[in-house]
Image (spheres, rainbow, N blue to C red):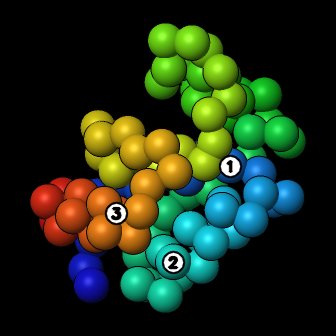
Amino acid sequence: MTQSLEIKLYGTERCHKSQYYKQYFKDLNLKYQFLDVELNETDANELRSLYESRKLNFPTVTIGDKKLRNPSDKELVKWIKKSL
């Protein structure tokens, strides 16, 4: 799968769902940026800015301008295909 879209994964190393998404993107051979919101305050603030509540809602995946909070595989595939 070729790619020109920007995928970001906001999560933590200790979060099993974050690990799941990391593996999911690797399995699809998609480039993505993993932003650990526990280790990096800048990444944490970037995630907070995505939500009105300013909470660290992780895992969150952004695909271009689309924000997905703990998405299903079906939802991820839909937005990846729409963005390609």
For the residues labelled 3 and 1, the Cα–Cα distance comes to 16 Å
Q: Is residue 80 visible?
A: no
Residue 68 is situated, as x and y percent measured from the top left of the image, at: 40, 45
Residue 74, disc: none
Residue 30, given in percent of the width and then of the height, sits at: 41, 75
Task: Tell me what residue is drawn at x 21 percent, y 64 percent.
Answer: 78
* Residue type of the residue flagged with mark 1: Gly
Of the image marks 3 and 2, the number of the one nearer the N terminus: 2
> Quarter holding the N terminus?
bottom left
| Contact between labelled residues 1 and 3, with CB atoms less than 8 Å apart | no
Residue that label 2 marks: 24
In the rendering, which numbered label is found on residue 76?
Answer: 3
Q: Is residue 30 left or right of residue 10?
A: left
| Residue located 31% across and 60% down the image | 75
| Amino acid, disc 2 | Tyr
- What amino acid is at disc 3? Leu
Say which residue label 1 marks: 11
**Which corner quadrant holds the C terminus?**
bottom left
Secondary structure beneath label 2: helix
How far across and down, in percent of the image, does residue 56 sit? 68, 29
Q: Quadrant of residue 79?
A: bottom left
Residue located at (66% from left, 60% from top) = 18
Q: Secondary structure at mark 3?
A: helix
